Amino acid sequence: MRFLLCIFLATLPLAAQTYDEVLALTKQGIIAYNQKRLSESRQMLANALDFDSTWRPTVLHHGKAYADLLIAELHIRNTVKLIAFEKFENAERELDEAEATFPGHLRIPELRELLLKKRADNTKQILLKMPEAKRKAYEEQMQKAQAAMDASKYAEAMHFYSGALKIAPDSLDAKMGYAEAERLLNQEDGDQKVAGLFRQAEKHEKDRRFAQAVSVYDKILRIEPRNSQAIERRAALIDFMQQQLGKGERKNLAKEYLLSGNEAFRKTDYNLAIEHYRVGQALDPKLANWDELIKKAMAAKKAQEENLYTDRLKELERRYQSAMLQLLLENYPAAIEDLEVVISIATQFKQDETKKHAEQLLQRAKEAMLRQDDEFITRDSPYFNFVQSLTSLGMTSYKNRDCIATQQHFGAIVEIFPKNRISNQYILSCTIILNPERKDGIIQDLIDTIYRTKDTNAYEARRFFEILKFIDPKNPVIPQLERELAEKTQLLKKSVQPAEFLEALYKKALLLSQSDPEAALQVLRQLLAEDPDNAKARALFARIEGRINRAKWAESDIPIAPRAMKAYADGIVYYNTGQLAEARASFALALELAPNFDRAVVALKKCDSYAKGAKF
């Protein structure tokens, strides 16, 4: 027994020495790998594996080094094949990839030299076939491009290489020079972006926002997948975060949420304040009087909602009346803008019938604007100046009784805008002046067209009617047609009931609005059936409708289950310590317990996008 114990004790220093040697070789191998000295790295790690083939870091990095060596070798072989097939641009790209993977590969300088020689040979052949003038122009562009490259003006170099390619499209030298300038320009932009991202990551680390810092390092690695500094910092942060989950971390997070909740309250962002207080309460219930803070924020939120509702309702009334006026003035773009605001407010406060009526008016206004564009070319049209200048020339020719010139000017407009009313009326007028015997036939055709289309397309009939009024203003059918078309094309319908009757209905609804809102809505529906565009009645309807639907639009009345809030708080802790799977599960549970928990939806999406971004 004593003999066996002596043997065991004798082997201990040897085992310790072996472990130290494996550790030293592995460390040196990893350093060499990060510096892209792949051959040395693989050799050192292989030596370490000879001592201990089970040490995980050694096995892992040996596999990485060997895989990178194989990738570099594959790129080298592809480069050789592409040079043989005279696909020099592709060969250059493959060689760049090989150099990025393993800069110390022995064949890279040799192949780079071969590519330069091929480029020079190609340039010589192209120059021999060129006339003297073109050759000089090509050489001048290439010299300027080289000077720009030497001065690191890559955008300028791309411009000169492009000029050289216009002279000699097959020039390999110009093509590869352009590609190199473009690569360097992108690299320059990428370097600036990476430097900015590193500064951002450092700031997050100082603020102890470790998950955000890891996310920024992921962005850096998507730009530069082999950036060793980002790889090391990211790994260190994830390791640190996973060690921080505990009672102290929950308390620190609760303090942060208390401070941010107070700040949000100060800035009157009560939704955010309530959310942060609830999360803080779930993290550490004893840190503060959370219930009192939440109650105070809820009261402030409710008051804010009431004020917001009143202000937005005033805005709805003002915009609605403005839209009515703009529609009467046929200023359809302004009417559309006002109606879109009305729809937005009605949607926010669940005023469904108001929203439906505004949408109907909006559709009518858009259709009217399209007709107006077809007939008159508004200032918003890119053709406005073109049409205005031709219209001015046409009217001047018409005043001078030069009908041929008039038809030419207005004919150019009609080619692009066939329904342009002014152009058509002047063209027909000139046709009658040049051919007086055709006047009766043209007028009769217009009248027949008006009668034929007034029941199916009243607006088209109206266009023909306006042309008729211009050509033959004293025609006896005009007054009757005007009355009929006015009824059919009036955008805002007028009530046939007397104003006193409508006013009485409005006052009745106003009295009922306090005691019986549903009855008040019925009275207003009767009034609006008689006069659909009564802005005053429509505003009162919106006000009562919003009050009845208050429970739907008032966010402060929507409770969140305590279990859901606790699950959400756990998810925040997991997220901040880099445990994405657990964070996602907690956020999903919170959403399952409270389907109206919007913050949990946002957190879940953020967790998913972060997980995807981590796969660099």
Image (spheres, grey):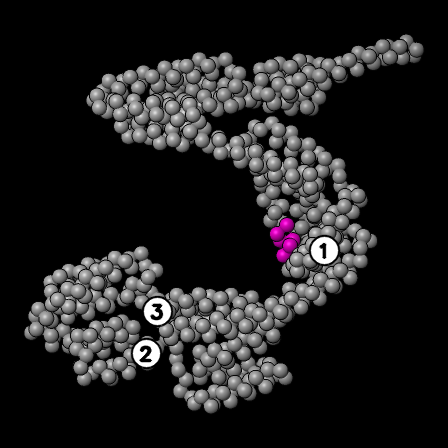
Magenta stretch, main secondary structure, is helix
Quarter of the picture containing the C terminus is: top right
* Residue 323 coordinates in the image, percent (x, y): 44, 72
At horizontal 45% and vertical 68% (from top left) the residue drawn is 338
The stretch of residues the image draws in magenta is 597-603
* Residue 377 coordinates in the image, percent (x, y): 29, 63
At horizontal 60% and vertical 45% (from top left) the residue drawn is 608
At horizontal 25% and vertical 22% (from top left) the residue drawn is 135
In the rendered structure, does residue 587 fall within the stretch colored magenta? no
Which numbered disc flags the more N-terminal residue, 2 or 3?
Answer: 3
Label 2 vs label 3, nearer the camera: 3
SS type, badge 1:
helix
Question: Is 369 left, or right, of 30 in this rendering?
Answer: left
Say if 456 sits above or below 195 in the image.
below
| Amino acid type indicated by mark 2 | Lys
The residue that mark 1 highlights is: 262
At horizontal 69% and vertical 41% (from top left) the residue drawn is 207
The residue that mark 3 highlights is: 368
The residue that mark 2 highlights is: 488
| Amino acid type indicated by mark 1 | Asn
